[in-house]
Amino acid sequence: MKKFVILNPLAGSADREQVKQLLADQWQKSEYEIYETSEDKRLADVVAAALERGFELIVAAGGDGTVSGVAAGLVNSQ
């Protein structure tokens, strides 16, 4: 299963390198990609592009805004 992680490095207190290492350890035999959020891209568009590229699992790693943006992308992809 292809996994796509949308990571907001400014949210919460977790260090982004620790998050990346955790994912690498857990998903070492899986295909995954990490996207770090930026203000110049709408998350709904990022999610739509990931789905078009065949990612089957979308993970939101961030705060309320990150989760809302990812949810909007998933709802609009139906």
Image (spheres, grey):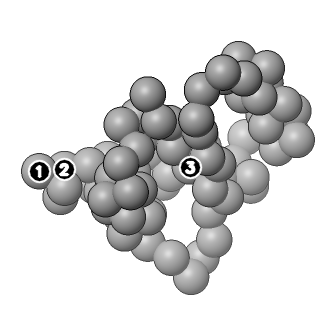
Q: Is residue 23 above or below residue 75?
A: above
Q: Which residue is mark 1?
A: 78
Q: Describe residue 62's horizontal placement relative to residue 74 as left or right.
A: right
> Which one is earlier in the sequence, the residue at label 1 or at label 3?
3
Q: For residue 63, which quarter of the picture? A: top right
Label 3–label 2 contact, CB within 8 A: no
The answer to whether one can see residue 47 in this image is no
Disc ID at residue 44: none
Please say if 24 is above or below 58: above
Q: Quadrant of residue 24?
A: top right
Residue extending farthest bottom? 40
Task: Give the quarter of the figure containing the N terminus.
Answer: top left
Residue 75: which disc? Answer: 2
N-terminal of the pair, mark 3 or mark 2, is 3
- Residue 75 percent location from the top left of the image: 19, 50
Q: Is residue 41 above or below residue 48?
A: below
**Amino acid type shown at disc 2:** Val
